[in-house]
Image (cartoon, rainbow, N blue to C red):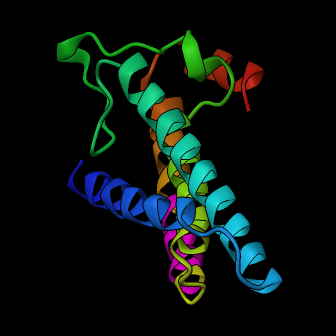
Amino acid sequence: MGETGSAVGELVVRGRHFLRCRGGTARKDQRCRRGLGAMLLTAVMYAFASWGMVANALFPDVMRVQDERGHAVVLRDPHVIVRHPGDAGALGAYFFTPWALGALWGLVMSALLAVALVLRTALEDRASHAGLEGYRDLASRVR
């Protein structure tokens, strides 16, 4: 949550900048509109990831099947749209944040983070297939 909080704080600061970004050259206006759009998309991605966390009471930091806590497949809310909504939201936020902050070099790091996230999600998916009853059915219905 600390990383999300600091990113959201930075977006708020940048958002104030974009709201004052009126007038000036056409290039400045275009850059401001692009940054504001990216900021809004980043907020949407964080909201989608948060929705996934709220919908899954056992949303894990580290994936493991938690039989002792009644771990079961979540068949509601964002999980019927995408199997890993937290990861999907994070992936979008990774790519929109550098645009929102005006730091396009950050896209290099975004690509590295995306590779790591995709690998982690594949491992999580494999563990869920192996140990979580009903997951195969979910996987056949939801992307």
Above or below residue 104? Residue 56 is: above
Q: Residue at x 54, y 31 (%)?
A: 129
Which residue extends farthest bottom? 105
Is residue 60 or residue 105 the one in the foreground? 105
| Residue 56 locus on image (x, y percent) | 38, 20
Is residue 5 or residue 10 the one in the foreground? 10
| Residue 10 locus on image (x, y percent) | 36, 64
Residue 126 appears in the rendering: no
Above or below residue 63? Residue 52 is: above
| Residue 101 locus on image (x, y percent) | 50, 73
Residues drawn in magenta: 108-117
Q: Residue at x 53, y 40 (%)?
A: 125
Q: Quadrant of residue 81?
A: top right
Q: Quadrant of residue 85?
A: top right
Which residue extends farthest left? 68
Q: Residue at x 27, y 44 (%)?
A: 61
Is residue 131 or residue 31 the one in the foreground? 31
| Residue 3 locus on image (x, y percent) | 28, 59
In this figure, what is the number of numbered marks? 0
Above or below residue 143? Residue 116 is: below
Which residue extends farthest front? 23
Q: Quadrant of the C terminus?
A: top right
Report the predominant secondary structure element of the magenta stretch.
helix
Is residue 73 or residue 17 the one in the foreground? 17
Q: Residue at x 42, y 33 (%)?
A: 50
Query: Is residue 107 one of those drawn in magenta?
Result: no
Residue 51 appears in the rendering: yes
Above or below residue 97? Residue 74 is: above
